Image (cartoon, rainbow, N blue to C red):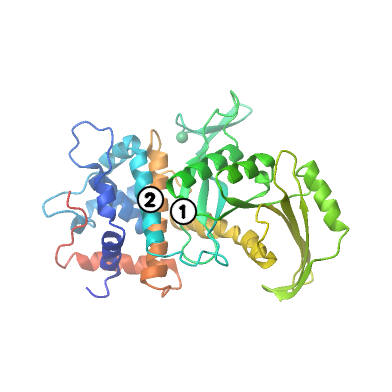
Amino acid sequence: MRNNYFVKLVRYMKNVYHLERGLNKLSDGRVNPTYSTGQVILPVLFGFLLRIKSFNELNLMIKNNEFSKLFPRGTKPPSIDAIRDTLKVIDLDGLKHVNQQIVKTAVENKVFENGTIDGYMVAAIDGTKFFGSNKKSCSECLKNTKGDKTHSFHSGAVMSTVGLGPKLVIGFEMYKPGQDSATKDEGELSVGKRLVSNVVKSHRKLIDVIVYDALACNSIWINHCKSLGIDTIVRAKNNNNNSLRLARNMVNKTKAVEVWEHEKGFEKVEVFESTFTMDNVEQPLRFVKFAIIHSNKQRTQIMMVTTCMGMALKTLFKIIRARWDIENSIFNNLKTECGLDHCFVHGGNAVEAVLYLIFMVSNIMQLFLVRRLRNHFTTQREIVRLLLKGLYLLKYRAELVFSSS
Ligand SMILES: [Zn+2]
């Protein structure tokens, strides 16, 4: 048992994160159910940990009694139909709470003791389309109509930690259909604002800085962050707005404030900066331009606006580049490996419920790899292989009960 990674993971989930408590508190709208909500969710949670690509696959695992050791003796795991029906009516706040508890426990256990970048706790927000269809849709679907064809899809904005340490999904918000005008679906900036407000409500003082892309380079976003007591760093583009254009022109006439040779694999980085005021923002802001010469002599530049007035330029550079962590570690990884772009079940609360479970699993896996296994594994695939092996060996061992409810 000592090297059974599945057992190690279950123990980690129970002993460190007390996940069974959270699952036992879940509820849903079914009448007289045979299984508690937590019992229905358990196989889905483990299915995602083992990287199932469809509910059909999960169904086969259940039928093959793969999960029997997770349930008390004599209890049959729920059928795939019961799982689908439950996900459609599950209480989403309960799932949200379970993920919040995972993040809170990680923070209490000093996972981010030294911040994620140069002592700062940095999170990034990015929007993504999860999945879409030309045939199926639900009342929460966003719509894109071209001619007589309508594409229905679900998108959301996700916030995760970036920089050093595990990349945890702290929160996400779905784009709501028909919000910002009668026909138009909700815009990303509104979703981003809602997301950061909700995260700050549940995790006070967790985040120091939020990094976001150029769509947030405006007074609405900057004032919103300021009102929540959070600093922000946003990418700036050439034509963002008038006051920004003036700041950029000013910077273009000045000399570099710092020049870095051979920094982070680049041949040379010249840094220009100025303080300016943006229309409708009370406080002064910093505009910074990094002119980069790559090792192949190619030239690029990164421009940004920030409320972090005293932050070192090298830290700003690290943070703006760490923005890609959410794209790589969260979106790309979860889409290729964990079915984030797959519609497992559609309708009611199911889409959001599945996303909560995928993000929860991603957080547990990140914490397990970084904290318990100390990054011993070079690939996540390897650990998934060992988890499956552990689950298989468990069949011939003593009983292991995950949830006692
Ligand atoms: Zn839908």
Residue 1 higher or lower than 162, as above or below: below
First in sequence, mark 1 or 2: give its number: 2
Residue at x-position 51% and y-position 64%: 115
> Mark 2 sits on what residue?
99
Q: Between residues 172 and 185, which one lies in front from this camera angle?
A: 172
Q: Amino acid at mark 1?
A: Val
The disc at residue 169 is 1
Residue at x-position 55% and y-position 32%: 143
Residue 219 drawn at (x, y percent):
68, 41
Say few, some or many: other residues with alpha carbon within 10 Å of mark 1 (under 14 / 14 to 19 / 20 or more).
many
Q: Is residue 213 left or right of residue 259?
A: left
Residue 66 drawn at (x, y percent):
24, 57
Q: Marks 1 and 2: CB-CB under 8 Å?
A: yes
Residue 78 drawn at (x, y percent):
22, 45
Outermost residue, left side: 74
Residue 130 seen in the current view: no
Residue at x-position 60% and y-position 61%: 322
Q: Is mark 2 within 8 Å of ligand 1?
A: no
Q: Which structural element holds mark 1?
A: strand
Residue 274 seen in the current view: yes
Q: Amino acid at mark 2?
A: Asn
The disc at residue 142 is none
Residue 59 drawn at (x, y percent):
29, 48
Q: Is residue 218 left or right of residue 171?
A: right
Say few, some or many: other residues with alpha carbon within 10 Å of mark 2 (under 14 / 14 to 19 / 20 or more).
many
Q: Is residue 392 left or right of residue 181?
A: left
Residue at x-position 23% and y-position 51%: 63
**Quadrant placement of the N terminus:** bottom left
Outermost residue, top side: 182
